[in-house]
Image (cartoon, rainbow, N blue to C red):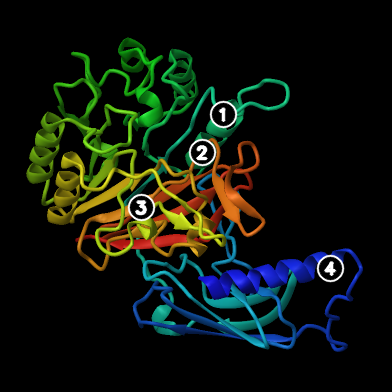
């Protein structure tokens, strides 16, 4: 880490000197930038993009790999309405002294329709290779699709005119997912800033403009001082805790928050929404009660032969090793770490972790950190992990309202309301799901965070 820090510091100093005109920039090669790429697949599994990208070039810079179609064009997909949706790059490779490598995540998936790999420097196509026939995806027919969102945060971020930015970002996310044909959306909490009723009223207002269910658990911001249960019940998970429940509500907990849903549109898959009751992250302070975990364990046991999607707000630290490199946590270039996880060692945290280790048919969608998906450059387990098969698969959901970034030139974490908005579009197949990270602000799918999760 110290070596990497010094390299970036030197690069920053040189960049500053070049900008000031004190030293001349490295000139482009007289015959133009030339580079070749070789992607070595780790397996011959169809659709798996686990492997190592290798780039050789005559100019040191950052190069990008894209998925391409059979004709060598950047891959796109189409929504059911016919809207063209592009894919971002799937790997960035930094070339130094003529060569560079980048390992991809073991869960990384090749999107349907990809047949080539394209190497770009900025807007210039430099190399095209065919994907080996055995790796070309053959996913078959999708059963249904759903959305996963988190950290919407009405009443927290405002523009220069005092307008709530979430009044733009949230309906845009819903429109994008609706256009992609989702049947249901799950939210991992933090709908509000301080639990204010107006946040939940806005949440319902935009949800009512669509024909699918949008269900949510409570996040830490929804546990704050302005929270009023009656407003939550009236506007969030509408009707779930009434006598006239929506069809598909299989079980509700006595606490008035936690419930199980499996409607016709989920094709037998089970969605569980599990709310925390505390905003405090500290030793000996439980985020959930013993009774809640009794209920959750009973539901896990009852549906152990089903595919279960769990929505809970707060992520877990790494089970072993450095906890600050666990899911949702990062060290940046300056060695600063950012973490507000489920406090490790607390009674409820230990039990929650044990449940996820026992019931690995669960896919756990969490939010809380707000990190953009490309912050996985600081932690390969940031977006998805099952810690070598020892736990249920945990998938990080970035923020609709204000994704966060950090970098060498941005040592502190920076929220980006209005500029960025992210979430997940999930394609469900019989034996697996494809989790597609979404960039709602630019209307694209983020190919570096598209993951295949097999049923366990």
Q: Nearer the viewer, mark 4 or mark 3?
A: 4
Whether residues under marks 1 and 2 lie with C-beta atoms below 8 angstroms apart, the answer is yes
Q: Nearer the viewer, residue 246 or 455?
A: 455
Residue 64 visible? The answer is no
Helix, strand or loop for disc 2: loop
Q: Which of pointers 2 and 4 lies earlier in the amino acid sequence? A: 4
Helix, strand or loop for disc 4: helix
In the orientation shown, which residue stands out farthest toward the right? Answer: 21
Residue topped by disc 1: 166
The image position of residue 266, as x and y in percent, is 27, 42
As drawn, the label of residue 17 is 4
The image position of residue 164, as x and y in percent, is 61, 23
Residue 52 visible? The answer is yes
Q: Is residue 139 above or below residue 436?
A: below
Residue topped by disc 3: 395
Residue topped by disc 2: 400
Question: From mark 2 to mark 3, how far is it between C-alphas?
Answer: 15 Å
Q: Residue at x 28, y 48 (%)?
A: 364
Q: Residue at x 57, y 73 (%)?
A: 4
The image position of residue 156, as x and y in percent, is 54, 26
Q: Report the side of 456 relative to 370 (left or right).
A: left
As drawn, the label of residue 246 is none
Helix, strand or loop for disc 1: helix
Q: Which of pointers 2 and 3 lies earlier in the amino acid sequence? A: 3
């Amino acid at each position: 880490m110290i070596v990497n820090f010094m390299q970036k510091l030197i690069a920053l100093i040189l960049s500053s000197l070049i900008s000031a005109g004190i030293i001349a920039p490295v000139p482009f090669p007289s015959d133009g930038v030339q580079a070749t790429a070789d992607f070595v697949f780790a397996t011959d599994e169809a659709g798996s993009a686990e492997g190592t990208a290798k780039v050789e070039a005559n100019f040191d810079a950052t190069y990008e790999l894209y998925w391409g179609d059979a004709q060598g064009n950047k891959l796109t997909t189409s929504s059911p309405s016919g809207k063209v949706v592009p894919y971002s790059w799937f790997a960035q490779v930094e070339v130094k002294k003529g060569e560079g490598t980048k390992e991809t995540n073991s869960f990384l998936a090749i999107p349907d329709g990809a047949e080539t790999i394209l190497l770009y420097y900025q807007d210039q196509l430099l190399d095209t290779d065919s994907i080996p026939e055995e790796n070309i995806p053959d996913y078959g027919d999708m059963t249904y699709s759903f959305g996963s969102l988190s950290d919407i945060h009405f009443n927290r971020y405002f523009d220069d005119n005092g307008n709530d930015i979430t009044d733009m970002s949230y309906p845009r996310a819903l429109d994008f997912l609706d256009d992609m044909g989702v049947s249901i959306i799950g939210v991992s909490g933090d709908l509000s800033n301080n639990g204010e009723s107006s946040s939940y009223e806005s949440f319902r207002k935009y949800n009512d403009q669509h024909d699918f269910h949008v269900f949510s658990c409570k996040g830490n911001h929804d546990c704050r001082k302005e929270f009023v249960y009656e407003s939550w019940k009236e506007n969030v998970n509408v009707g779930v805790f009434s006598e006239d429940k929506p069809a598909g509500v299989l079980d509700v907990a006595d606490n008035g928050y936690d419930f199980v849903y499996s409607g016709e549109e989920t094709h037998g898959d089970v969605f569980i929404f599990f709310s925390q009751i505390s905003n405090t992250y500290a030793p000996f302070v439980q985020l959930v009660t013993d009774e809640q975990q009794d209920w959750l364990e009973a539901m896990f046991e009852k549906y152990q032969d089903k595919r279960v999607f769990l929505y809970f707000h707060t992520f877990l630290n790494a089970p072993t090793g450095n906890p600050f490199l666990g899911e949702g946590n990062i060290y940046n270039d300056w060695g600063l770490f950012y973490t507000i996880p489920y406090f490790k060692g607390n009674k409820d945290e230990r039990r929650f972790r044990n449940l996820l280790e026992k019931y690995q048919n669960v896919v756990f969608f969490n939010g809380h950190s707000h990190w953009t998906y490309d912050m996985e450059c600081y932690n390969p387990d940031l977006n998805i992990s099952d810690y070598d098969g020892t736990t249920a698969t945990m998938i990080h959901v970035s923020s609709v309202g204000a994704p966060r970034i950090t970098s060498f030139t941005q040592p502190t974490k920076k929220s980006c309301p209005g500029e960025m908005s992210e979430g997940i579009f999930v394609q469900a197949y019989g034996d697996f799901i494809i989790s597609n990270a979404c960039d709602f602000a630019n209307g694209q799918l983020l190919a570096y965070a598209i993951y295949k999760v097999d049923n366990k």
